[in-house]
């Protein structure tokens, strides 16, 4: 048995596309707006293939490894990534496009859960993904406040 869980959200940020892209492209900015990130460190120059060592808050606040690798880097419009550590290995991307009043950011996540994970974890993973993409509103506040 296999199940795909996914979430997506878009928001307009009143800043230039290039500035918004730079913010989302470098995941070291994530702790500024993703509340579950405990630590994150890029392991090289920002490009396709670079990895980030990351820990996120799990059940009971326990630190869980959630390392990611950049899979797409197309300035100033798209960054893709995939999880390479942790119990769930999501794929995700940020798309940034010019719009009246600034930049529209779309943050999408998906993960394929198989076997027992599909049964036991699907609801929790869906809730976490929904929360992650909803965090765009905090990113908007951070970016527009700077």
Image (cartoon, grey):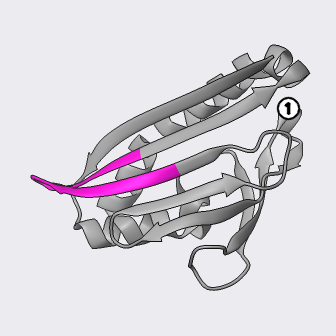
Q: Is residue 25 visible?
A: yes
Please check the rendered image and state whether residue 102 is part of the magenta-colored stretch, yes or no.
yes
Percent position of residue 16, x then y: 22, 67
Tell me where residue 46 appears, x and y as whole percent. 57, 79
82 left or right of 26?
right
Instruction: From the image, tell me which residue sits under label 1.
Output: 59
**Left or right: 95 in relation to 104:** right
Could you tell me what secondary structure mostly forms the magenta stretch? strand
- Specify the quadrant of the image occupied by residue 27: bottom right
Q: Position of residue 52 (x, y in %)?
A: 72, 68
The kind of secondary structure element at disc 1 is helix
Tell me where residue 94 appears, x and y as whole percent: 44, 53
* Residue depicted at 78% across the width and 56% down the height: 84
Q: Is 94 positioned to the left or the right of 17 in the image?
A: right
**In the orientation shown, which residue stands out farthest toward the front?**
1
* Quadrant in which the C terminus appears: bottom left
Q: Which residues are magenta?
A: 93-106
Instruction: Identify the residue at horizontal 81%, vertical 16% (top origin).
Output: 1
The answer to whether 4 is drawn above or below residue 30 in the figure is above
Q: Is residue 77 above or below residue 105?
A: below
Q: Residue at x 56, y 48 (%)?
A: 92
């Amino acid at each position: 048995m296999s199940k795909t869980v996914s979430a997506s959200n878009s928001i307009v940020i009143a800043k230039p596309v290039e500035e918004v892209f730079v913010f989302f492209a470098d995941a070291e900015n994530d702790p500024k707006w993703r509340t579950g990130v405990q630590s994150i460190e890029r392991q090289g120059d920002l490009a396709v293939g670079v990895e980030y060592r990351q820990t996120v808050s799990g059940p009971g606040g326990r630190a869980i490894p959630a390392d990611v690798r950049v899979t797409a880097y197309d300035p100033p419009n798209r960054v893709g990534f995939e999880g390479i550590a942790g119990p769930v290995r999501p794929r995700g991307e940020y798309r940034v496009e010019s719009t009246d009043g600034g930049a529209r950011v779309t943050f999408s996540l998906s993960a394929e859960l198989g076997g027992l994970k599909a049964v036991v974890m699907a609801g929790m993973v869906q809730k976490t993904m929904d929360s992650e993409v909803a965090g765009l509103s905090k990113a908007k506040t951070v970016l527009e406040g700077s």
